[in-house]
Amino acid sequence: MFANSFFTEQILHVDKARTPPRPVHARGSGAHGYFVVTHDVSKYTSAAVFNGIGKKTPVFGRFSPATPNLGGPELNRDIKGLAVKYYTEEGNLDHLCLHLPVYMYRNPTDFDFLVRAQRRNPKTNIMDQTVAWDYRTNRPDIFHLLFWLYSDYTIPNGYRKMDIFPIHAYEIYNKKGERFYVRFNYRTEQGLANLTNVQAQAIASQDQDYFTRDLYNAIENKNYPSWTLEMDVIPFRDLKKLNYNPFDVTKLWEKGTYKTVTIGRLVLDRNVDNWFREVEQSAFNPSNLVPGISGPMDFLFQSRVVSYRDAQDYRLGVNHNKIDINLPKYAKTYLRDGNPPTRYNMKDAPNYLPNSFNGPVPYIDENAPSRRLLVLESYAVDFGNVAEFYNNVLKTEEERIRLARNIAADLVLVQEPVKTRVIKMLSLINETLAERVAAAAVPPTPKKPLMATKETYAPLARCIEVFRP
Ligand code: HEM
């Protein structure tokens, strides 16, 4: 039996059947579909994918909760993602979107620390709210996102019923090379619908796969989920008139400074045949752009250009863009060899550049703006947008009370001095909010935290241990 090659292949294959999961957004569900242009936006962008009313482009979309591991919970109070790959005739255009319209921070070096601070404690392997809030209060530019996160907007009633945003301000340009700065918004056509904590927990106790099941069933039942894609537009010439930084991903654009233009509809109408092949092996990269869309100009975006490619080289290998689900319609390349898939490996086409034998020529868009905008960034923090969210985006006192309750539910487990610091920072935004949170963030009796102080994160002690000669 042990000399039987069928047996050997079976038993050895299963040992290697796992690929590294994504470092964030590990758990995913996906579907195929199309994008159809419904409005003429040629005066803003020359991108072929957004031009010609009625034009259809195939897409693939992958939904994910941001923090859980592969197989982790979908119904937690967490950011949800949708990554969309447009297979355009000019190459792939990827939009990586979150379901809240602002991001956590602006300084590119913050990613690793932020991710660790939201993760399980390295000693106990338990989620550690003290660490999360310690980080947050030391990097208060995250507060705007936190207010969205703890509000009614955060737990959608399934992936179909949420809006989604690529967040960054993208530079786009038309055939004359005129530049515009836009924020894309995908608005759900199913109607925005959210769950409270109690509703989400009740569903999760019955169905751990609620979001994935809802998406899959809707598509199987031909109830295809769709989103209207629109963009908020500011022309280049108006940038100087703004009294705020439109490239700051932690803030929203101010009302009255932009106009909103509809582009078309995103429709998902086909479930995958094989989850691993299509969903797990999909690789989205925000730097996959097409002529007519030069992309975001901020520093955070520059850091993403590096990060995704590296993550995918590690996770799927150097030829990840030659995996079927990632393969652009238009792909002539000088990349050769490496681990499979190499596909045709460009057969005998010249493998060096420049060459005199009709090898692919890098594309140069004659209409692309010849001057590049340099964004000078400041990392100063103000709570203007947070106060605006609290006072005006939240419309009712009930919404504000639920926000306070949701923050308090997490603060119960937070230790001093972090807890007092959180309340103090909340009081800078609104006194009543701070009082409500302080009153509700009381540990249940007996007044012992779930874990003794000694067992929680003790960074200094650990460092001394590790670095002692
Ligand atoms: C506006 C800011 C951001 C948005 C909207 C965003 C969105 C997303 C989404 C939707 C995914 C899941 C992709 C998928 O389904 O495969 C993802 C994955 C990921 N993100 Fe971000 N993200 C942002 C910022 C960042 C930053 C600043 C970094 C690091 C510099 C980063 C690094 C990653 C990495 C490494 C992955 C996993 C990629 C893979 O393995 O395929 N993200 N992001």
Image (tube, rainbow, N blue to C red):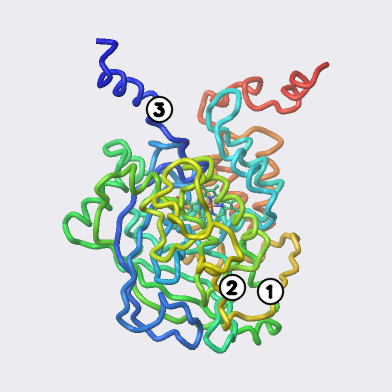
Residue 165, how many percent across, how many down? 48, 64
Q: Does residue 309 appear to the left or right of 345 in the view shown? A: right
Mark 2–mark 3 Cα distance, whole angstroms, equals: 48 Å
Q: Is mark 1 within 8 Å of ligand 1?
A: no
Q: Is residue 351 visible?
A: yes
284 vs 116: above or below: below
Disc assigned to residue 253: 2
Distance, label 1 to label 3, CA atoms, is 52 Å
> Crowding near pointer 3: few (<14 within 10 Å), some, many (20+)?
few
Q: Which callout, 1 or 3, points to the residue nearer the camera?
A: 3
Tag 1: amino acid: Tyr
| Residue that protrudes farthest toward the right in the picture | 469
**Which mark, residue 379?**
none
Q: Amino acid at mark 2?
A: Trp
Circle 2 residues within 10 Å: few <14, some 14–19, many ≥20: some
Marker disc for residue 16: 3
Residue occupying the point 22% across, 57% down: 219
Q: Earlier in the sequence, mark 2 or mark 1?
A: 1
Among numbered discs 2 and 3, the one appearing first in the sequence: 3
- The percent position of residue 189, horizontal first and vertical second, equals 31, 68
